[in-house]
Image (cartoon, rainbow, N blue to C red):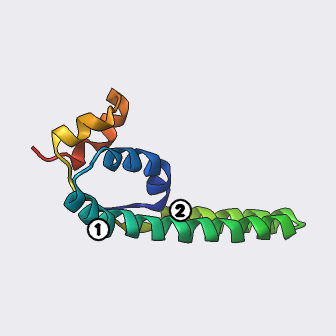
Amino acid sequence: MKMRLAELIQKRNLYAKLYSGITDFDRIVKIDNRTIEPMEKILKAHDKMRETFQKELEDSKNDKKIEEVNSKYSEELEKEVNIDFVTVTKEEVKKAEFNVFEYRQIKHLIKD
């Protein structure tokens, strides 16, 4: 599934909650290998990139340089990333106890 990096950052806790209720070992291994590990790599790369941009901002003295750094960071957030989300069953979703707003954001990952 392709999504913007900014969207992945925004929904990282929601996806963690989605998979947290799953206890079957084979499912855990599948989810970890296909979804969690790649997502963590992307998010770690983002965190490192953000630290670099923050350091550049701290070292910047003029407004033009600050604007340039902010613009570059915004461009990075708009880049698409590809995550292979493992779909879950309705029973697995029930364990996570989503509220209606959270559910609406992840319902495309639920199989019948």
The residue where tag 2 is placed is 77
**Residue with the most extreme right position:** 61
Q: Is residue 4 above or below residue 14?
A: below
Residue under the point 39% across and 70% down: 38
Q: Is residue 57 left or right of residue 105?
A: right
Q: Is residue 84 above or below residue 21?
A: below
Asked if one can make out residue 104 in the rendered structure from this viewpoint, the answer is: yes
State how far apart marks 1 and 2 are (Cα). Answer: 22 Å
- The local secondary structure at tag 2 comes to helix
Which image quadrant for residue 53? bottom right
The residue where tag 1 is placed is 34
- The local secondary structure at tag 1 comes to helix
Image position, residue 39 (x, y; %): 41, 64
Residue 66 versus residue 93: which sits nearer the camera? 93
Image position, residue 77 (x, y; %): 53, 62
**Residue with the most extreme top position:** 100
Amino acid type of the residue tagged 1 in the rendering: Arg
Which numbered disc flags the more N-terminal residue, 1 or 2?
Answer: 1
